[in-house]
Amino acid sequence: MDEFIAQDLQQLRERWAGTLLEPWLTDLPAQLAQGFSSGRYGDIPRWLQALLSLPNLSVQSVNLNTDRVGCTGTISEGQRDQLTAALEGLHPWRKGPFELFGLHLNTEWRSDWKWNRLENALQDLSQRRVLDVGCGSGYHSWRMLGAGAQEVIGVDPSPLFNLQFRAIQHYLRQPNINVLPVTLEQIPSQLHAFDTVFSMGVLYHRRSPLDHLIDLRNTLRSDGQLILETLVVEGGLNTVFIPPSRYARMGNVWCLPSPVTLCGWLEKVGFKRAQIIDINTTSTSEQRTTPWMKFHSLEQFLDSDNPNLTVEGHPAPMRAILTANAP
């Protein structure tokens, strides 16, 4: 992992010199070392071996603006088997889909559906520096780059997701995009360095959702755009559901506001022009078990007799996308 850390730091030092992001470089080496610590994550050597076993293939075209992010090129049957085995070594693949040399990584989530819901609400990403919080393997980060972003930085503490991103980047080889194994809270406070910030599927995992919104605000330049996606519940102003234990078998879900309540929270912490872009009940076509994610998924998290309820009897997952601008 030392080689990957060194590569990241070299790229970021070159890009961030003289910018508002330069102060982050002071803490970043220690943060990367911690994020890739095999002492904390015992599977890193196995995942790294899978990454290093990817075959060397010639890329003909790179696709960032299609539902399946990836590339095309010539591949033999033996190379396809080697590619499949290497990528299966990075199981489970949750966010996607991707397609490499005709191999479809049919991930648990149809993340392209989420992108299609929010795309029209995006301010033009051309020449913008973008932060993708809780980016997973980087699917939406790739779509941001394809939409014209000048630079995309994804942050997610999972080293597996980071190595999945590197597997895709092994072939796409795009400049100005990195996924870092850090959290939003590790980014220096009051940085105000990003033009657009995405937080998708993170808020409900935070014990203090308003602190999360404040942290997001503090990464944005004045009038920069926030895209926020999270679990919500039906209700009016000040409706908030706090699961008494698990929610859809997840133990780290702290609170689900109504969409209008979430707008109020954004305005409370200083955001402007908060708007609800989309509200959608998650279907078992959008989140499901696949050969690339073989564990239980949404179907097993819902009441088998009433799919409008979770197995705990709570309202089934409904997600909202909102946009707002920093003060």
Image (tube, helix red, strand yellow):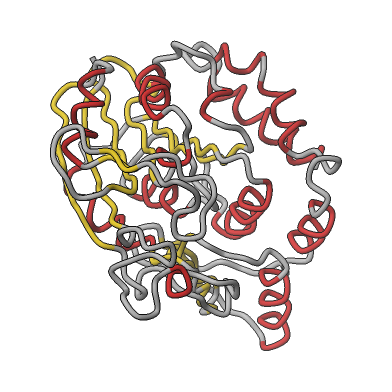
Q: Nearer the viewer, residue 214 or 118?
A: 214
The x, y position of residue 266, in whole percent, is 25, 26
* Above/below status of 290 relative to 253: below
- Position of residue 93 in the picture relative to residue 77 (left or right): left
The part of the image, by quadrant, that contains residue 327 is top left
- Position of residue 85 in the picture relative to residue 270 (left or right): right
- Position of residue 136 in the picture relative to residue 82 (left or right): left
Query: What residue appears at the point 68 percent right and 28 percent down from the top-left corner?
Result: 10
Q: Which residue is outermost to the bottom?
A: 77
Q: Nearer the viewer, residue 85 or 12?
A: 85
The part of the image, by quadrant, that contains residue 229 is top left
* Above/below status of 35 relative to 93: above
Query: What residue appears at the point 80 percent right and 55 percent down from the top-left corner?
Result: 43
Query: What residue appears at the point 44 percent right and 38 percent down from the top-left corner?
Result: 132
Q: Nearer the viewer, residue 208 or 73?
A: 208
The x, y position of residue 34, in whole percent, is 75, 31
- Position of residue 54 in the picture relative to residue 258 (left or right): right
Total tally of numbered discs in the picture: 0
* Above/below status of 227 relative to 290: above
The N terminus sits in image quarter: top right
Query: What residue appears at the point 39 percent right and 25 percent down from the top-left corner?
Result: 216
The x, y position of residue 232, in whole percent, is 28, 47
The x, y position of residue 175, in whole percent, is 52, 41
